[in-house]
Image (spheres, helix red, strand yellow):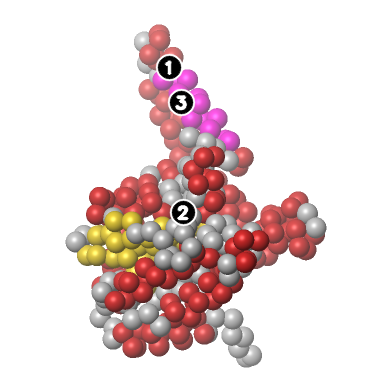
Amino acid sequence: MEFLDFELPIKDIIDQIDKCKSIEDETNVDTTKTFNLLQKKLHETKKSIYSNLTPWQRVQLSRHPNRPYTLDYVKNISGDSFLELHGDRNVSDDKAMIGGFGKIDNQTFMIIGTQKGYNTKTRQFRNFGMANPEGYRKALRLMKHAEKFNIPIISFIDTPGAYPGLEAEERGQGEAIARNLFEMMSLKVPIIVIIIGEGASGGALGIGLGDKVFMMEYTWYSVISPESCSSILWRSWDHKEQAAEALQLTANDLKKMNLIDGIIKEPLGGAHNDVDFAANKLKKIILSEIEKLEKIDPEKRILNRIKKFSLMGVVKND
């Protein structure tokens, strides 16, 4: 288990617990009382730290190296039923964008999402979760496929942004994202969007337009990352904490502004501490919301979707 800077007090207590266990094993001395006190102290410390997180600390948690990614959740909630589909039928198969059919409790879904890697090799393979134009075009192809067979869509978002390289711009990165926004607005099937990690800029929005949008507890969703914002305003990353505060990018901030529909509870300290718990929460939300959305007439659902996003950014003068 890896620990972030602000989690070091937790690491110290865990080290003490491990030492306590080893002393008992080596000397047969009863350390139950000390062990129980340390366990209590650990719980209290975790509660104190995670209930008072700053926006920047929430950004750090969303990037935790042990945090589950899209395929982890897919494997957990749909098991072996997930059939991945590849390619945009134009350029290539973008490994940063995954998609395919999967069953959740015997109901078929089209599941799409951005995917990061777990080590240096797989991070390069997945392009650090930054999709190219062909990734967004693949996602759109699969969503159109789902619409043809009346299959609801789930979109998992965890990306630092769309890939900003020269070759991506040459192949029409902006057009690909804009096309997705246009087409997703009028898809006749229900769409549920869930931010499971980072939700950065147009890279997230390219697969982020849905009937319902949810954020997991320790995630963020914004037009720009705190580091990039700090670089623009102060010509340095040194003010990233201040930028994170000003951007109002946490799940609680976006819920207050009615930009998302709900917050999905995570285990104390983040989804990586209990992936099964986090996945079960996701599964319950997905099945519950799909049941409600499927009762709405497709045309009305589209109108509701258009209204939902059209109201974002509207300033009302009292």
Name the residue located 41 percent from the left edge and 66 percent from the top edge: 89
Name the residue located 44 percent from the left edge and 51 percent from the top edge: 69
Q: Quadrant of residue 178?
A: bottom right
Q: Quadrant of residue 191?
A: bottom left
Disc 1 marks a residue whose amino acid type is Ser
Q: x, y percentage for residue 1?
A: 48, 35
Label 2 to label 1: alpha-carbon separation = 44 Å
User: Residue under circle 2?
Assistant: 95
First-in-chain label (3 vs 1): 3
Q: Main secondary structure of the magenta part?
A: helix
First-in-chain label (2 vs 3): 3
The front one of 309 and 48 is: 309
Numbered disc in front, either 2 or 1: 2
Disc 3 marks a residue whose amino acid type is Ile
Magenta residue check for 158: no
| Residue 22 marker | 1
Name the residue located 29 percent from the left edge and 76 percent from the top edge: 148
User: Residue under circle 3?
Assistant: 17
Magenta residue check for 20: yes
Magenta residues span: 8-22
- Using the rendered image of the protein, determine whether residue 219 is visible from the camera's viewpoint: no
Label 2 to label 3: alpha-carbon separation = 41 Å
The front one of 172 and 318 is: 172
Q: Residue furthest right?
A: 235
Q: x, y percentage for residue 82?
A: 28, 55
| Element marked by disc 1 | helix
First-in-chain label (2 vs 1): 1
* Image quarter (top left, top right, bottom left or bottom right) of the C terminus: bottom right
- Using the rendered image of the protein, determine whether residue 239 is visible from the camera's viewpoint: yes
Name the residue located 44 percent from the left edge and 58 percent from the top edge: 93
